[in-house]
Amino acid sequence: MKKVFPKQFLHSAFTMIELVFVIVVIGILTAIIIPNTKTNPLEEAAIQVASHIRYTQHLAMVDDTFDANDSNWYKKRWQLAFSKSIYTGGTQAYTIFSDTAGTSTGDAQESEIALNPQNNAQIMTGGYGNAQAIDFRHANFKGMKKLNIGSSYGVESVSLNGGCDNSRVVFDNLGRPMKGDMSGNIQAYENDNLIQTDCVVLLKDANDNNVSIIIRPETGYATISF
């Protein structure tokens, strides 16, 4: 004799199968998606640095430093300089500044550093010198802690390779990237200081993982290579 199950029983059994199926699918998706959504501090640092390289270029283009009455006008170009010293707390940091004060020594002073466009009470440095406002260790530090990429993201070292050298990238009023420290130059353009080939800014962490930021010659276009 054929058994006949009540309709409500069949409906209940079908719902349980559905529930188990959904749970299994959620478990699979969780296993796949969650590892890919974990943040990578080194990549976050690279994204931030690339963004600030573009901002430095923007400042150079809107704030033309040319002055016919100043023979050293070209030394005041906007630049992004990396540093690692006691003033950065011994970790890797960078500063965006225009070398306008005094004799243009090549070193950043508080008055020369770009203001944080989102908060004018802050200046765009992760630590640079012994003045309280630009000493990362000091309670009166006026910089941005995020720009101390060693402390914030675990960046152990930064090296500039390829078409650039030294520890900084400079932009002229056309937004073209230049290499080296302008303070020792005796004319606006000399020794091919315009970047001729791709400049590679290499960020490394303590485990030797690395991310590169590529700055193109002429255009100064910055991209990230993970």
Image (cartoon, rainbow, N blue to C red):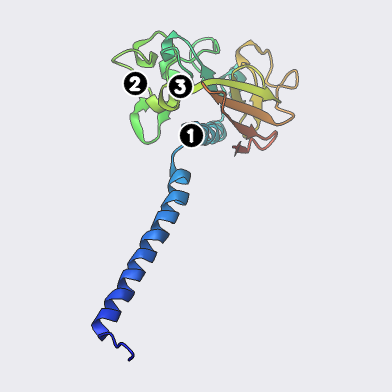
User: Disc 2 marks which amino acid?
Assistant: Lys
Return the mark for residue 129. none
Mark 2 vs mark 1, CA separation in Å: 19 Å
Which residue is pictured at 29% across the width and 16% down the height?
Answer: 140
Residue 71 visible in the picture: no
SS for callout 2: loop
Residue lying at 42% horizontally and 60% vertically, measured from the top left: 25
Query: Which callout, 2 or 1, points at the residue further toward the start of the chain?
Result: 1
Looking at the picture, how far across and down is residue 18, in whole percent? 35, 70
The picture quadrant where one finds residue 135 is top left
User: What amino acid type should be assigned to the residue bearing mark 1?
Assistant: Gln
Please state, as top left, top right, bottom left or bottom right, where the C terminus lies in the image: top right
**What is the x, y in percent for residue 64?**
56, 30
Residue 217 seen in render: yes
**Residue 192 location in percent, x, y?**
75, 22
Residue topped by disc 2: 142
Residue in the picture at 38% in, 10% down: 131
The label nearer to you, 2 versus 3, is 3
Image coordinates for residue 90, horizontal then vertical, percent: 44, 12
Q: Which element type, helix, strand or loop, lies under badge 3?
A: helix
Q: Which mark is residue 48?
A: 1
Q: In screen coordinates, is 6 left or right of 50?
A: left
Say whether disc 1 or disc 3 marks the residue closer to the N-terminus.
1
Mark 2: few, some, or many residues within 10 Å (few <14, many ≥20)?
many
Position above or below: 90 against 37: above
What mark, if any, has residue 150 been given in the picture? 3
Q: CA distance from mark 2 to mark 3?
A: 18 Å
